[in-house]
Image: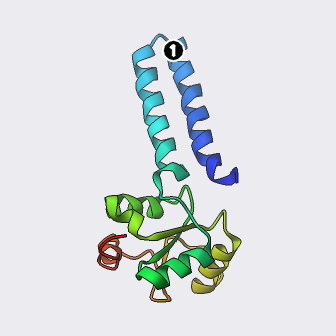
Amino acid sequence: MTRPWIVPTLMVFGGSALAAGLILRGSPGAAVALLAVFVLLAGANSPLIFPRSIGTQEARRRSAADGGPVIFWRPGCTYCLRLRIRLGRAAHRAHWVDIWRDPAGAAVVREANGGDETVPTVLVAGRPHVNPDPAWVRERLPSSR
């Protein structure tokens, strides 16, 4: 459960250390700006920006009911972040599975990618698509949920 928070935590601590160094050199304004950048990067790489993750079985059940894609992701993945941002407010119409929290999801991703945990992997109608174009995923979202 703590694994998804390692990168954001390191970003905040690293930014804090750099900001402290700038303060000691007499640049408090630059320190605040630098710390703000690191906090924003930490937020973007945290699980907080993504819709609530569910388990693989539940995601597949919901997908079968409403036709929405199942998106396998992990915190810290820049391609997952790109997909999430490009989907915008429509992202909640997909079913998100964090492979670091769900071993069954990680197994699905490994099976689809020849043993690699390449994310985002998107299941649409039971077929896996690795790192698809966000516009393509948006077209496959159900109209409302």
Question: Residue 37's spot in the image, x, y percent?
Answer: 43, 35
Secondary element at image label 1: helix
Locate residue 139 relative to residue 1 in the image: left or right: left
Nearest the viewer among 45 and 29 is 45
**Visible residue check, residue 123:** no
Residue at left offset 41%, top offset 21%: 30
* Rendered position, 19 above or below 122: above
Label 1 belongs to which residue?
A: 23
Quarter holding the C terminus is bottom left
Name the image quarter holding residue 17.
top right
* Rendered position, 26 above or below 140: above
**Visible residue check, residue 102:** yes
Locate residue 123 relative to residue 85 in the image: left or right: right
* Rendered position, 26 above or below 38: above
Question: Residue 122's spot in the image, x, y percent?
Answer: 47, 77
Question: Residue 92's spot in the image, x, y percent?
Answer: 41, 63
The mark tally for this picture is 1
How busy is the neighbourhood of tag 1: few (under 14 within 10 Å), some, or many (20 plus)?
Answer: some
> What amino acid is labelled 1 in the image?
Ile
Name the image quarter holding residue 69.
bottom left
* Rendered position, 86 above or below 143: above
Question: Residue 113's spot in the image, x, y percent?
Answer: 58, 83
Residue at left offset 36%, top offset 58%: 85
Residue at left offset 40%, top offset 17%: 29
